[in-house]
Amino acid sequence: MFGKWLEQEPVEQPEGELHYEALVESGELDEEELMDQLGRDVARNYLNPSELALVFDDLGSPEVADYLRANKFPADVMVRHGDFGEVVTAGLYRRVRRWCVPILKLRYKQTPGQAVQGTDVLAFRFRQTPPVIAVPEVKTRATRKRDLGKEAYNSLEKVLDRLDESLHFALARCAERNHQFLVRHLAALLRRPRERVVERHMVFVHDALVWKDDVVDLLADVVTQRTELTVVKIRGLKDFVARAYQAAETSAGPRRTETSKDTAA
């Protein structure tokens, strides 16, 4: 779905260590198809397929939407927008860029309004030598904020200072699901920190109607190490996110009970 929904937009690269990529809606998917698929992906980020199957068994389809709205999906608009940015980022890295994203952190919220601590998303290339960790800092904005890049830069620096805590969290979650391949590789990254490459990434999910590239220029002025910036531009972002969550409440269905292809913890 992500490969059909989003396409690259030509951009001018800033000078220095920042590499900039912009993604815009391709128009390849019609509204109904897009929202159905995106709604399922939103729901999948909050519940693993086995959990959703139990919800359906206990409640039946008509009550599932009420259950998700009350117990899983945040009501606060700012929290919901932040979560949606993480959903988009995880899908982009897993399905388009083909990184390994071993856990979907939104599944581990204790309350819908909680902000999960640590990295927004962790992505890996375990089979490269040395193995690579991508640490994307995600910002979702429906209104313009000129210094968004500086805000993201400061947040990313804080996350990188405590990266091992996020790796331990991912390892524990993978161990709980008995994903031994992931446990071994995550443990090796923790034991031998000098034998890993950490890449700095940022993802801005932004309303296309108010985006301006001066955000990129200002960010380029402060970045001192190679950093990958992806801006996902969505027209009418606030309404788009609301529709995606409405779709998640109603379109998450029995197809989510298939566990064989769902490897995220």
Image: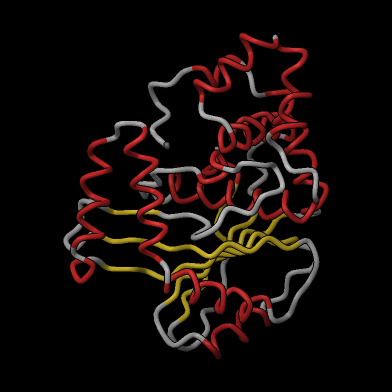
Could you say where residue 190 lies in the image, as x and y percent from the top left? Answer: 25, 60
Q: Residue at x 58, y 83 (%)?
A: 219
Quarter holding the C terminus is top left
Q: How many marks?
A: 0
Residue drawn where x is 49% and y is 88% of the image = 15
Between 92 and 67, which is closer to the camera in this rendering? Answer: 67
In this rendering, the answer to whether 110 lies above or below 21 is above
Q: Position of residue 135 (x, y in %)?
A: 43, 63
| Residue 214 drawn above or below residue 107 | below
Colour pattern of the rendering: secondary structure
> The N terminus lies in which quarter of the figure?
top right
Q: Could you say where residue 156 lies in the image, as x and y percent from the top left? A: 51, 72
Determine which quarter of the picture holds residue 27.
Answer: top right
Residue 231 occupies which quadrant of the picture? bottom right
- In the rendered image, the vertical position of residue 215 relative to residue 249, given as above or below: below
Q: Residue at x 67, y 42 (%)?
A: 111
Above or below, 9 against 61 in this view is below
Check the image and name the residue furthest to the front: 110
For this rendering, which residue is in front, 234 or 140?
140
Q: Is 203 on the left-hand or right-hand side of 29?
A: left
Q: Residue 160 location in percent, x, y? A: 43, 71
Would you say 67 lies left or right of 131 here? right
Residue 115 lies in quadrant: bottom right
Q: Residue at x 37, y 50 (%)?
A: 99
